[in-house]
Amino acid sequence: MDRSESSHVHHWAEVVTHPSTVASNLEEKIAKAPEVIELKRAEKLIEREVENNMRKVAKKTQAEAAKAQKLIDQEAEKLYIQGLSPEDKKRVKENKRIANQATTYIQSRIVRVIAVIFLFASRDRSIE
């Protein structure tokens, strides 16, 4: 028998029966099993649900902290204003009124600018 022609068969037989190849083939078969696939999907769903819950809790905690900080700031401002003289109280009130007017004006200007941008953007699209 001429073994030179069958040497490649012998080589592949050794490769296929090698312990690491057998182990990797077994791992691959296990990974493709429907039960394992379903288990991995369930794990991903659980992981997503846990992450979503953690995000919700973090968001709620941040909102509560912001609300608490706002109350603290309001209380601190009340105490500050109580300690002012009547003239200073009038000045603080006037400054707040001016700041609110400026904020309202800036917001209205921003809305106008955005409206103009959308108007020009819609005109540019109609040309194409």
Image: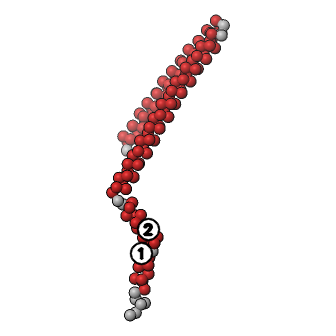
Is 50 rendered above or below residue 11?
above
Instruction: Judge by depth and name the residue closer to the eye, 1 or 68.
Output: 1
Characterize the local packing of mark 2: few (<14), some (14-19) or many (20 or more) Cα atoms within 10 angstroms: few
- The answer to whether residue 95 is visible is no
Q: Earlier in the sequence, mark 1 or mark 2?
A: 1
**Figure quadrant of the C terminus:** top left
Secondary structure category for the residue under label 2: helix
Q: Tell me the mark number nearer the camera, choosing from 1 and 2.
A: 2
- What x and y, as percent, mark residue 63? 50, 28
- What x and y, as percent, mark residue 30? 38, 61
- The answer to whether residue 35 is visible is yes
Query: Going 42% across and 83% down the picture, which residue do you hit?
Result: 10
Q: Name the kind of residue labelled 2 in the image.
A: Ala
Query: Going 45% across and 41% down the picture, which residue do you hit?
Result: 51
Instruction: Judge by depth and name the residue closer to the eye, 82 or 61.
Output: 61
Does residue 6 appear left or right of residue 96 in this picture? left
- What x and y, as percent, mark residue 65? 54, 27
Instruction: Judge by depth and name the residue closer to the eye, 16 or 118.
Output: 16
**Figure quadrant of the N terminus:** bottom left
Query: Going 43% across and 86% down the picture, which residue do you hit?
Result: 7
Is 9 rendered above or below residue 81?
below
What residue is shown with label 2? 23
What residue is shown with label 1? 16
Q: Name the kind of residue labelled 1 in the image.
A: Val
As drawn, the residue found furthest toward the left would be 34
Is label 1 in contact with label 2 (beta carbons under 8 Å)? no
